[in-house]
């Protein structure tokens, strides 16, 4: 697993939130858990482009940052469910606002992203 070699710069709110939410799927995971998709298999179906390994790593990081909690039920096979903590729930309006901004500027964002990808 990745081991950080330097301490992150945590001098402002943007640095802090970047450290907690950095990861391609973290905001989507939080959003889908809030919508009731609690089991890893359900999350995998909602984000089929992500590998199970990457989702598990990002779920673990979200748990370490106390944004989600993990419950393991003592059944065979083991059943795992995730839910947002109160701290994690406080991010949902912010993620929603970012999503609305993305929807509002969808055409512009799609154009600049595609243009950037073509120039690489």
Image (spheres, rainbow, N blue to C red):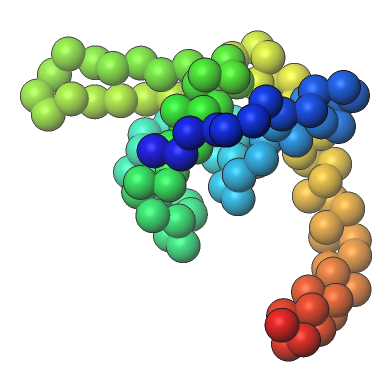
**Residue 34 seen:** yes
Q: Position of residue 34 (x, y in %)?
A: 59, 31
**Residue 37 seen:** no
Q: Residue at x 73, y 87 (%)?
A: 118
Placement of 8 over or under 52, stated as above or below = above
Q: Residue at x 45, y 56 (%)?
A: 50
Residue 110 left/right relative to 42: right
Residue 82 left/right relative to 77: right
Which residue appears farthest toward the front when viewing the image? 5
Residue 89 left/right relative to 70: right
Q: Residue at x 79, y 28 (%)?
A: 9
Placement of 63 over or under 97, stated as above or below = above
Placement of 116 over or under 36, stated as above or below = below
- Quadrant of the image for the C terminus? bottom right
Q: Nearer the viewer, residue 98 or 17?
A: 17
Q: Position of residue 41 (x, y in %)?
A: 33, 43
Residue 115 left/right relative to 25: right
Q: Position of residue 117 (x, y in %)?
A: 72, 80
Q: Position of residue 62 (x, y in %)?
A: 55, 27
* Quarter-of-image position of residue 94: top right
Q: Residue at x 50, y 21 (%)?
A: 63
Q: Nearer the viewer, residue 51 or 72?
A: 51
């Amino acid at each position: 697993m990745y081991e950080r070699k330097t301490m992150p710069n945590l001098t402002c709110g943007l640095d802090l939130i970047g450290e907690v939410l950095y990861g391609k799927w973290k905001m989507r995971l939080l959003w889908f858990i809030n919508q009731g998709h609690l089991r890893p298999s359900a999350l995998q179906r909602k984000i089929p482009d992500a590998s199970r390994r990457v989702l598990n790593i990002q779920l673990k990081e979200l748990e370490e940052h106390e944004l989600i909690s993990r419950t393991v039920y003592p059944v065979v096979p083991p059943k795992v469910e995730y839910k947002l903590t109160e701290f994690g729930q406080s991010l949902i309006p912010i993620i929603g606002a970012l999503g609305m901004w993305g929807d509002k500027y969808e055409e512009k964002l799609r154009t600049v992203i595609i243009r950037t990808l073509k120039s690489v």
